[in-house]
Structure formats: structure tokens, C-alpha cells
Image: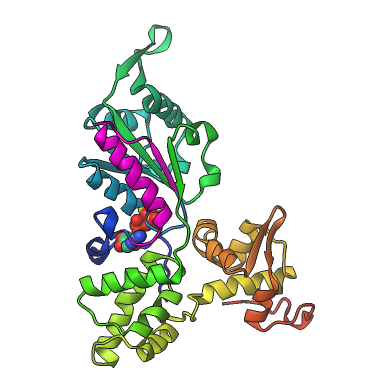
Amino acid sequence: MVSAYQETQDAHENILRPKLLQDFLGQEALKQNLSVFIQAARDRADTLDHMFISGPPGLGKTTLASIIANEMHTEIKMTSAPALEKPKDLAGILTTIKEGSIFFIDEIHRLRPVMEEMLYIAMEDFEIDWIIGQGPAARTIRIPIPNFTLIGATTKAGQVASPLYTRFGITTRIGFYPQDELAGIIRRSAQILDTRIEPDAVIQLAGAARGTPRIANRLLKRLRDYAEVLGDGIITADIISIGLERLGIDRQGLEEQDRNILRAVINFYGGGPVGAETLAISIGEAIESLEDFYEPYLIQKGYLKRTPRGRVATQSAYDLLKIRKGDTSNENQGLLF
Ligand SMILES: Nc1ncnc2c1ncn2[C@@H]1O[C@H](COP(=O)(O)OP(=O)(O)OP(=O)(O)O)[C@@H](O)[C@H]1O
Ligand SMILES: [Mg+2]
């Protein structure tokens, strides 16, 4: 069973990753705004304002950051908050960054407070505070750093400290892609991979891609395998049906683990509310993958609700699993998986 959460990027993902804004398909409103901001900054020979990008995994946050660097004709330095262990890690990057370039911090919600404070000053004044000496002799000096654009990305916008969040001049959220936009991404990827896919197969695949380009690309590659081994190399609607069934994915992209989540809420916790941590343990899943990967799509599809007291299964979830509300015969049936 392939799990889509935090898949490491393979070589093909790099081939498929758009380099320019015009190849970044869908998200029209976001792209339009961004191209204005990029053009204005370029015309003024200025750096782009700091930018914050949030949204579920695989929707194009990292891609967008590297596109911005390309469009601004500048370099990009990429890191992720957990990799910045000590202030000197961050200071090392900020003092050596190229004038006008992009500094990308992934998972910015995981930045340690000392690093956040260093960033505040860096973002506003393009300086950093540096402590030299120790004990009573210690003193702070301000060191100028090159002008740069910080792009911060996160799957958890709610966990970013507000003093940090408010220092970004551009804030944007990438949402799930509608089916027609995913269809466009699949057609582009199929062309790059030199694979034939029939028009109705594109639509079907787009419907099963959880609104997520990364999943669309991954499914396309798996279905190409099925087409080559089981068929004549062309991805047809039949190949999609067979392939998705073998992968344990239904027509709307739900995996077995999605159904396990809904089943757990209904059978173990009477439909909810149940806390995320308890739910994660019940299905043997890490809390991060429950919250970042599975839940957003289940919520978007209307199967699950997040309430202050916990997760609640909706009527649609009962319908999907063919369980009648109030039917206790399903409860506590033991292991789910
Ligand atoms: N708008 C798009 N058009 C075409 N392809 C896209 C688009 N957005 C994403 N992709 C494809 O999906 C892949 C995953 O995108 P990306 O790595 O940028 O996601 P992410 O939001 O950074 O995910 P994570 O939160 O896991 O870091 C890219 O390599 C690219 O091939
Ligand atoms: Mg990323």
C-alpha cells in the first residue's frame, strides 16, 4: 500500500516540477497576484516582499518558492526549520546569502523561539543581533546582512507565532485543486513522461488525486506501470479502474486508512467527538500524518468535522461505510486493521 504522506522526492518529481509561473497550472487568483508582485519588484529593481505560503502537503509550496526565484532571476537557498538547530546555523545562512536572493524555510511553524527572534530583526532591518563574549563581558553587536526575501512554508498556519506571521508582506494559502486543474496537471505530466493517457482516463485520475498535484503525478506513474504490464502502454479508463482497485484507492481518492479513520470515529467513539491524539493512536498513525495528510481531505469531502471538542463523523461518513446511525452492533468490534 502506497502512503502519500511525506513521500521523498524522486527523480521524476523533479522532472515534473514546473520551473516558471506559466507552467504552474491552476490556482489562477494566486498566480495573478504573484505575477503582479513579481513584476512590480522587478521593475523597481527591488527584492520581493517576504512571503508566507500555507497549505496541505503536495500542493506546490516548495515548487512556488523555486518558481519565484526563477522569475526574479535570483538564487534560492532552501532549508527547513528542524534543520536550524542553533542560532549560528541561521546566522551562517543570513550573513552569507546573496543580495536580493530568496531564503526558503520549510515547516516554518517548527522554528525555535530564539531563531524566530533573530528572524524578526533580519526581516525588518536586514541586520542580526549577535552576542560576543561570555558572562558579564558579553555584549550584543548588530551585524548588517544582505537584502533578501524570506519565503516561509507550512502545513500548519495556525501554529505560526503571530509576531512572525505579521512580518510577512505577502501571505497566501494554497487550497486543494479542483478536478479540471488536476486534469491539466496530469496531461502536462503525461506529456513530459511520454505516456499516452485517454481523455476520460485523465478525468477519472484527476478525481482520485485528492486535490493534490503530487498525488496526481504519483498515481500517473503507477498507472503507467499497470498500462505497460497489463495493457498496451496506453492508460485507459479500464486501466485506471483496475489500477486504483489494486492500489486500494476509491474513485474519490480515499485509501483504506481514510476509511479506517472514519470507522474508528464511528465504531469506537460513537461518531465523536474524539481528540486527534486518541484517534491517531486508534488507527496506528502518527498525529502529523493524521492532521496534515488525511484529515484535510476528509474534511473537504465532508466526511469529518473538526470541532473544539474533537473530530466528529458526518452523516456522509456513515453513508460511505454503510453504517446506520445508532446501530451499536458495529461498536467495539476489535481491531480495525
Ligand atoms: N500548480 C502545479 N502545477 C503543476 N505541477 C504541480 C503544481 N503544484 C505542484 N505540482 C507538482 O507536485 C509536486 C509537489 O509539489 P511541492 O513539492 O511543491 O509541494 P509542497 O506544497 O511543497 O509539499 P510539502 O508540504 O510536502 O512540502 C511538484 O514536484 C510538482 O511536480
Ligand atoms: Mg515542500
Q: What residue appears at the point 29 percent right and 32 percent down from the top-left corner?
A: 148
**Is residue 8 found inside the magenta-colored segment of the image?**
no
Q: Residue 119: where, in percent of width, then height?
A: 40, 29
Q: Residue 79: where, in percent of width, then height?
A: 32, 43
Q: What residue appears at the point 23 percent right and 47 percent down from the top-left corner?
A: 70
Q: Residue furthest top?
A: 137
Image side of residue 193 versus residue 168, left or right: left
Image side of residue 193 versus residue 249, left or right: left
Q: Quadrant of residue 213?
A: bottom left
Task: From this view, report whether residue 289 is shown above or below residue 162.
Answer: below
Whether residue 195 is visible to the viewer of this picture, yes or no, is: yes
Q: Residue 302: where, in percent of width, then height?
A: 62, 68
Q: What residue appears at the point 46 percent right and 35 percent down from the top-left corner?
A: 112
Task: From this view, report whether residue 99 is shown above or below residue 103.
Answer: above
- Magenta span: 25-53
Ligand 1 appears in which quadrant?
bottom left
Whether residue 8 is visible to the viewer of this picture, yes or no, is: no
Image side of residue 323 versus residue 283, left or right: right
Front residue of 181 and 102: 181
Q: How many numbered marks appear?
A: 0
Q: Quadrant of residue 27?
A: bottom left
Task: From this view, report whether residue 331 is shown above or below residue 46.
Answer: below
